[in-house]
Image (cartoon, grey):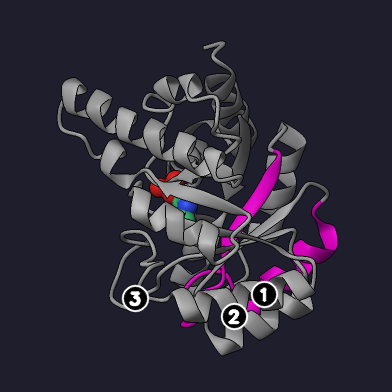
Amino acid sequence: MRLCINIDHIATLREARGGVEPDPVTAAHICELAGAQGIVCHLREDRRHINDRDLRLLRESIKTKLDLEMAATDEIVKIAIETLPELVTFVPERRQELTTEGGLDVRGHRHHLRDVIAEMHRHEIEVSLFIDPVLEQIDTAAEVDADKIEIHTGEYANARSEREQMELLEVVRAAAKHARGLGMGVNAGHGLNYLNITPFRTIQEIEEVSIGHAVISRALFVGLDRAVRDMLRACRGDV
Ligand code: PXP
């Protein structure tokens, strides 16, 4: 299971003062030096954290792979094509939300998504769709020619008991198997932390996890290098 680090929170802290630090680009380099296998950022329409300069410098300087989370809007699609990340992950975006809440409604937006995915493929950009672990949504993701899905693990992460968590783990497992069966790659993310990542190691189909909040929070106390290394160990199971 590869670990990609979402660095949006570093930019959120910078924007709290509207200055130049901490710099998410420096953070990305530290994550890579610690062993992260990819860098994730979300260029929101309102630029509340990551901005165009960050994206440009990330593209120029990171050595692993860039996963650009984005809404499928004309403006951001144009920027993605100019930037050429290795992967774009389409997410729903609402201005009022604190973070991405809920997966994409692929069924409801399938005509638009099919067109935008085709456009990305013309530029040799792989496409992932961030969706809830719902089989019908996964079927539609395959129909619109997505290369991968990212399973929204928010419900699993918010489980209120161990029993509920194990039930929701099985929902994620079934979704991952279903997507693999349809020939798509499987990533997962949202709300994953140093503890709830452990059972994920039993889902062979999950190739990659995208984690932000837990790692950046731990970094405040132990430093970013150690926080990333700790999460890599948790992903591997040697904690
Ligand atoms: N994947 C997606 C699509 C997200 O929107 C986010 C949050 O930015 C994450 C993963 C990472 O979630 P968290 O910050 O809770 O680890």
Vertical arrangement, residue 45 with respect to residue 99, above or below? below
In the image, which residues are magenta? 37-62
The residue carrying pointer 3 sits among few (fewer than 14), some (14 to 19) or many (20 or more) residues within 10 Å by Cα, namely some
Tell me, for residue 94, which label it has, or none. Answer: 3
Side of 62 where 76 appears, left or right: left
Q: Which quadrant of the structure image shows residue 200?
A: top left
Q: Residue at x 75, y 51 (%)?
A: 65
Q: Which quadrant of the structure image shows residue 19?
A: bottom right
Q: Residue at x 36, y 48 (%)?
A: 135
Q: Are marks 1 and 3 in contact (CB under 8 Å)?
A: no
Instruction: Indicate the secondary structure of the residue bearing disc 3.
Output: loop
Side of 194 where 69 appears, left or right: right
Side of 8 where 131 appears, left or right: left
Q: Which quadrant of the structure image shows residue 54?
A: bottom right
Q: Quick check: is the Cβ at mark 1 less than 8 Å away from ligand 1?
A: no
Instruction: Indicate the secondary structure of the residue bearing disc 1.
Output: helix
Report the amino acid beneath label 2. Asp
Q: Earlier in the sequence, mark 2 or mark 3?
A: 3
Q: Nearer the viewer, mark 1 or mark 3?
A: 1
Q: Are marks 2 and 3 in contact (CB under 8 Å)?
A: no
The residue carrying pointer 2 sits among few (fewer than 14), some (14 to 19) or many (20 or more) residues within 10 Å by Cα, namely few
Side of 191 where 44 appears, left or right: right
Q: Quick check: is the Cβ at mark 2 less than 8 Å away from ligand 1?
A: no
Tell me, for residue 115, which label it has, or none. Answer: 2
Report the Cα–Cα distance between label 1 and label 3.
Answer: 24 Å
From where the camera sits, is residue 204 visible? yes
Vertical arrangement, residue 48 with respect to residue 185, above or below? below
Vertical arrangement, residue 108 with respect to residue 175, above or below? below
Q: Earlier in the sequence, mark 1 or mark 3?
A: 3
